[in-house]
Image (cartoon, rainbow, N blue to C red):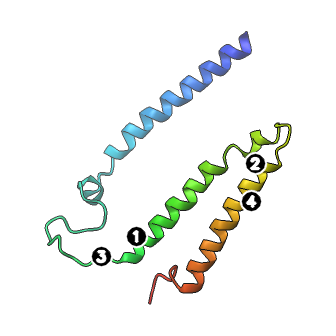
Amino acid sequence: MNVIASVILIASLLSTILALVSFWLPHLNPDYDKLSPYECGFDPLGTARLPFSLRFFLIAILFLLFDLEIALLLPIPWADQMADPTLTFLWAVSVLALLTLGLAYEWLQGGLEWAE
């Protein structure tokens, strides 16, 4: 019981210290760009009709697609405990193969090239 109490005490003390330091440090060196509500790289006073690269959206969609892949493949370790896990592994391999083929297609078409 003494070990559990000491672990809880150390964890709460460390988290309290880190929370206080994280609230205290930003006040020492405020940055105008970080304090502005528009820290996305656009000029907040300029025109809103600037052309925007569609390649940014392609990279963002690919990131979301591969982020979703992680969520789809998350239950695979638990499928190992089933009586016949081959169907689950077959689905996982097919999802990975489809995503790999799609990535190879985008790469060969030049869709991942940032500069033209």
From mark 3 to mark 4, how far is it between C-alphas?
A: 37 Å
Distance between mark 1 and mark 4 Cα atoms: 27 Å
Query: In terms of sequence position, does the residue under pointer 1 or pointer 4 come before the other?
Result: 1
Q: What amino acid is labelled 3 in the image?
A: Phe
Q: Are discs 3 and 1 less than 8 Å apart at CB? A: no
Dot 4 surroundings within 10 Å: few (below 14), some, or many (20 or more)? Answer: few
**Inter-mark Cα distance, 2 to 4:** 9 Å
Q: In this view, does 112 lie to the left or right of 50?
A: right
Q: Is residue 108 above or below residue 28?
A: below
Q: Can you say which quadrant of the picture contains the C terminus?
A: bottom left
| Residue 57, label in figure | 1
Tell me the CA gap for discs 3 and 1.
Answer: 9 Å
| Residue that mark 4 sits on | 93
Q: Which residue is drawn at 56% across and 78% down?
A: 106
Is 99 on the left-hand or right-hand side of 78? Answer: left
Q: How far apart are marks 1 and 2 (CA)?
A: 32 Å
Q: Give how far across and how far down residue 4 sits, in percent.
A: 70, 16
Q: Check disc 3 and report the residue beneath it.
A: 52
